[in-house]
Amino acid sequence: MPKSHSNPSDSIFEIACPDCGAMLKIDAASRTVIAHTPAPRKRTFEDFDQATRALREAEERKESIFRQSVEAEKNREDVFNKRFAEALKKAKETPDTGKPLREFDLD
């Protein structure tokens, strides 16, 4: 029967997280993470020109969304007026069925 060496460093190994790239030290015996080294942060932009372009594009998107909301607000009154006119037309076309019911008429 082979002898087992119980060296604590044998039961600890490092593995890279497949999701974020962080390095994890894991104790195999207890199956726990004993140390964590975060992955180096990735640069968002390679240079200032790329960052500037991205900021301009973001500003243009914001401006476009704002213009669309302003236009929708301008047309809002027209839409309400059209809806009201349609409801009024429908109400005039529907014949009046008589006087409204009162609670004591239901007895």
Image: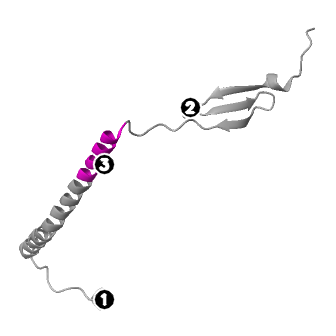
Name the residue rendered at 71%, 37% in the picture: 35
Q: Which residue is mark 1?
A: 103
Classify mark 2: residues with Cα within 10 Å, few (<14), some (14-19) or many (20+): some
The type of residue carrying mark 1 is: Glu
Q: Nearer the viewer, mark 3 or mark 1?
A: 3
Q: Which residue is mark 3?
A: 55
The prevailing secondary structure element of the residues shown in magenta is helix
Quadrant the N terminus occupies: top right
Q: Specify start and end residues of the magenta stretch as a single range.
A: 47-61
Camera-side mark, 2 or 1: 2
* SS at circle 3: helix
Mark closer to the chain start, 2 or 1: 2
Crowd tier of the residue under label 1, counting other residues whose Cα lies within 10 Å: few below 14, some 14–19, many 20 or above: few
Please tell me whether mark 1 sits on a helix, a strand or a loop: helix
Location of residue 4 in the rendering, given as x and y in whole percent from the top left corner: 90, 16
Above or below 62: residue 24: above
Mark number, residue 21:
2
Amino acid type indicated by mark 2: Gly
Q: Earlier in the sequence, mark 3 or mark 2?
A: 2
